[in-house]
Amino acid sequence: MTDTPRAYKKHLFAIVLTTMLCAGLLIAPRVYAESVAVIDSGINPNHADLAGRIDQGIDLIDGDSNPFDETPEQHGTAVSRIIASVHRNNRILPIRALDGAGLSSESIVIGGVNFATNSSARVINLSLGSPQNAYSQALTTSMQNSARSGKLLVVAAGNGGQPNPTFPASLAALFGGSAIAVGALNRNGFIASYSNRAGNSKDYYVVAPGYSSFSSFVGTSFAAPYVSGTAAAILSQNPRLSAQQVSEIILNSADDLGAPGTDEIYGRGKLNTAAALAPQGDLDLPGTSDDGSSGSGALAAGLVIGAGVAAAVIYNNKKLKEAVVVDSYDRPYKVDLGELIEVRNDGLTMDRMMKNLRRTTEMAQLAITEKLQIAVWYDRDPAKELYPVSEFDDQENIENWSLSLHQGGNRGAYYALNMNLDPRQFFGLAEEVNETTLFDRRNLTAPYAGFASSGNMALAGYKTATGVDLKLAVVDMDDNTDYGVESKSVLLESSIQPHERLRLGVQFSGLNEQGSLFGGASAGALSVEQSETLAAGFTARLKLSQKISLHSIYSQGYTLVKDRNRGLLQQFSGIGSNSYALGLSGRGLIRKNDRVSLTLSSPLHINQGSMSLSVPTQVDFTTGNALRETERLDLADAKRETDIELGYHLPLGKQSGLAAYMIYRNDPNGLADKTARGRYGTMMSFSSRF
């Protein structure tokens, strides 16, 4: 193939910069050197950028093993230097099939293809073509055999300015996804006037710069090696990839040019080396199965961990800093997983508190019989009310809804079927927290009921005239978020009133979390197969006076965990945990019907147990398996979080009120020393609705 000369002074800075930027937070770990078989005019090894990067080739023109480039324009050398410039690990296997005039015979080119097919090179660069666009069955057969053997053929489209590539690039679509035809861009980023267009090869055609800093000549011959170099770089990330997969990555990551989508001018678009080397699809943990397959969306499902185990994992992020993840093509990337972990806490945050303060909850209740009633609650956000509308037409302003079907009285049997309600409001110290949404129910009611904010519940109970209250509930929670918390639990609570001012209670619960542990994500790298917790708790309420009550609760749980294959969290021992709360509440202390609450509490804290943090740090491409570093962690080593909550609520009317709330968190989630945010956090807000 003869190239049109065109002088220029542009270098490859932009391409190299783009390749560097593609790493971003993801840095490719150790890569393997890959060779490109360059069937061309040979190579001049006397260039610093080629030093130590040339494999032993062959000279099919002179019949020796010294494929020296004798063309005046150093055609093959320029092609090789472009390939080497794309990635530092790219190597060159030179096959001299063009003489000093850039010409050859069909048999010599076929010999070059056959030599490349039998070599270790996985990519074959053919910056050549038939000047007369003459079809050759023999060369076609040779290239088909090469494709079947696993080689990727990258072929220059030709410099005739024609609607279709010339032979053999015109056959790119016939090689089962193992060939790419390459057109040339000019320095303005448009298809060069001399370049053959995509035409009938549009599905397997990309464009790349038709120029380089290594030659004063331009042409599709110098566009093809950019693609070949990118293909070799992709293979260096994962040598187990097939030629079809490499081609797919290059074609799918190309920047669309011309008409939207694949078109007959630019084909699939402009080669984007940075995008091709960047992760494709969902990131995942490397596989450890015999077939080398990876897990299913371990990172796509989120790195969300429950507050109870967060400290033990995040404090040991030296291993997490060196973690290796893979994309959908099992190409490894090094990433600091510790920076991506989100700690899930179902406590009362500033954001939740502000939403509670501005939210209006409305209720509709219908009595079916004297004792059987149905009630519906729904929340409205006043900030979203732009104009008055009919109550039932204002659907977009309804944020949450709940439904309860309940029957009962002061004595005897009672039951309830609830949908989308917080089940904790029926247990423990619920009477102290139900009348205002400000107080945190997390530790005051039933800490082991589950970790979503609401759920569906079937409850049955019995009250006696002597003050005994026995209730049993089955709870199903699913918060329907991207990293869903799914659990099922059984709660049994019994309380007695030995004195008119004293009520004592005991709780028993069995909690089954599907995929999560203490409220972490139910899917993903930090999930487990399942966890099962048995817990017991004790509650007490003491009326100190008509206006002031003392309340306390203590809960202790024991958890067994089943590991998730290929997850980061492995080999759990039995886990012991507990939580407590102690507080005072008052009514009418300052003004009539106001409520004051002061609570000292500690959310779920692990006081017994251990696990292994198993972090993949390399991939063995001979087997496709992950090489992991494992460290045993003491889950009870984290500091305990202690919260102090002070709340005040003053109704000012049917639709208005004043509320204030403050929380002091000492060692939030046990992570205060790790974060630079200090050892505590405070929140305060005042709000009124009129």
Image: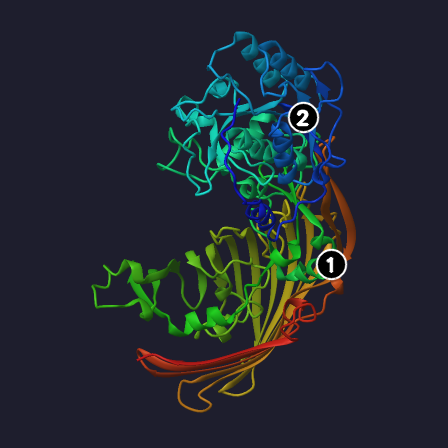
251 relative to 364 in the view: left or right:
right
For the point 62% across and 33% down, the residue is 78
Q: Nearer the viewer, residue 458 or 91?
A: 91
Residue occupying the far bottom of the picture: 590
Q: In the rendered image, which quarter is residue 417 located in?
A: bottom left
Residue 463 % position (x, y): 49, 65
Q: What SS does tag 1 mark?
A: loop
Query: Which one is closest to the eye, mark 1 or mark 2?
Result: 2
Residue occupying the far front of the picture: 72
Of the residues shown, which amino acid type is indicated by label 2?
Asp
Which residue has dot 2 on it? 69
Q: Nearer the viewer, residue 686 or 333?
A: 333
Residue 381 % position (x, y): 34, 68
- Of labels 1 and 2, earlier in sequence is 2
Label number found at residue 316: 1
Number of dots carrying numbers: 2
Of the residues shown, which amino acid type is indicated by label 1?
Asn
Residue 372: tell me if it is visible: no
Q: In the rendered image, which quarter is residue 659 located in?
A: bottom left
For the point 68% across and 16% down, the residue is 115
Q: Nearer the viewer, residue 168 or 529?
A: 168
C-alpha span from label 1 to label 2: 56 Å
For the point 49% across and 29% down, the residue is 4
Number of residues whose C-alpha sits closer than 10 Å to that of mark 1, classed few (under 14), some (14–19) or many (20 or more)? some
Look at the picture and state if 160 lies above or below 394.
above
Residue 247 % position (x, y): 54, 29
Look at the picture and state if 479 lies above or below 254.
below
Residue 529: tell me if it is visible: yes
565 relative to 645 in the view: left or right:
right
